[in-house]
Image: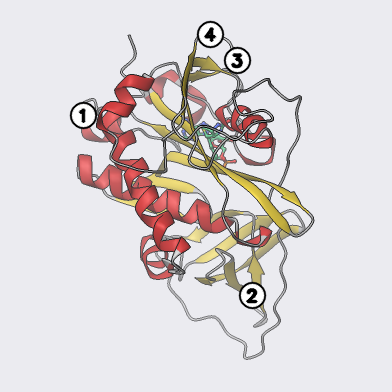
Amino acid sequence: MSELSVEGIKRGLKTDLIGQSIVYCSSIGSTNQALKELAAQGAPEGTLVVADEQTAGRGRLGRKWLAPPGTSLLLSLLFRPDLAPNQAPRLTMICSLAMADAIEGLTGLPVGLKWPNDILIRGKKAGGILTESGTTGEHLDYVVVGMGLNVNLDISDLPELRDMATSLSQELGQEVSRLELLWKILEGIEARYKSLRRGELLHEEWVARLINLGCEVQVATPQGVLAGWAEGVGTDGALVLRTPDGRRERILAGDVALQSAAQKTQPPGPHVREAVLGVFESSCRGDPLRSPWAGARPAPTTHFECTRLFFWSG
Ligand code: BT5
């Protein structure tokens, strides 16, 4: 039996918002997709969807997230923050910081973050975050943050990722409790979310964790590839890129490749032009599932379990 059950998660979770409603599925298409559908039906802030297996796990931009059953943490959290839509990346920020802290605290492994959403251990990807939001006009209805973390994963089971991915057990030489990690991650997220709600930006903590600042990088954005120096990150989570001709670009979504990892050079050029290039991935689609929250005020501590298929009953 999986260590990840609603009862098991509840037993040791010291939060009062995050994870107070839990949906556990042994197998599901995508925890993000399921939670977006629940969000559209009024699921409460802090709702957690967690699974042992995803049959259609998603990365950003239509990419796949791979995880053999029972090896990983695969979870999504629902936020209903009082933020503008373009500030939603702050949720990615707090979740990745909490993941990094939890991993380091429990395993002692060194964790770096690669803008915008990668969890790295010794230069290899151990986890990733997919943040999706639902908006009405200029109003952010909800943000779903999906987190995938390779915990007890033998990377040789995913040969296509062998050169770029790793797992906690691979790096540590022993298995790690997914349940304990989950508790620590959720507690770390709650603490930071409360800080965010008090107006704290956590910008310094984020900057300190990012491995690609000060480096020469190439950033693939929806508008094309930009090269330059990763000069900093804004409080909204945007990457500030200084191009070789001295312009300063603000990028909200993209993929970063380091051109030379150890390089920390000063970029040339005095003048600055700001441009928001990225558009935050945003969607609110899908056939509504019948959920316990549909059409009613949600109960603050509702817990559901389901088995192979994502299926709601009353
Ligand atoms: C991400 O996308 O890194 C976001 C991954 C988010 C996954 C979670 S799991 C729970 C929740 N529900 C979902 O459906 N998704 C979220 P991106 O930056 O686009 O990276 C995707 C790329 O990472 C893939 O194209 C692969 O190259 C690589 N990849 C896939 N599976 C991986 C794994 N297990 N470990 C490391 N790299 C992986």
Residue 312, numbered label: 3
Does the residue at mark 4 contact the one at mark 1 (Cβ under 8 Å)? no
Marks 3/1: CA distance? 39 Å
The mark nearer the N terminus, 3 or 2, is: 2
Q: CA distance from mark 3 to mark 2?
A: 51 Å
The amino acid marked with disc number 3 is Trp
Q: Is residue 103 left or right of residue 92?
A: left
Residue 186 horizontal/vertical position (percent): 36, 41
Looking at marks 1 and 2 on the same chain, the residue that comes earlier in the sequence is marked by: 1
Q: Quadrant of the C terminus?
A: top right
Residue 24 in picture, x, y percent from top left = 46, 21
Q: Residue at (20%, 45%) from the top-left corner?
A: 108
Outermost residue to the bottom: 270
- Residue 85 visible in the displayed image: yes
Relative to 71, does residue 197 appear above or below in the rendering? below
| In this view, the mark in front (4 or 3) | 3
Of the image marks 4 and 2, the number of the one nearer the N terminus: 2
**Type of amino acid under label 4:** Arg
Disc 2 is placed on an element classified as loop
Q: Nearer the viewer, mark 3 or mark 1?
A: 3
Q: Which residue is mark 1?
A: 173
Can you tell which quarter of the image residue 16 is in? top left
| Eye-nearest disc, 4 or 1 | 4
At mark 1, the secondary structure is loop
Does label 4 or label 1 sit earlier along the sequence? 1
Q: Earlier in the sequence, mark 3 or mark 1?
A: 1
- Ligand 1's quadrant is top right
Q: Nearer the viewer, mark 3 or mark 2?
A: 3
x, y percent for residue 244 = 63, 77
* Mark 4 → mark 1, Cα distance in angstroms: 31 Å
Look at mark 4 in the image and give the residue it sits on. 308
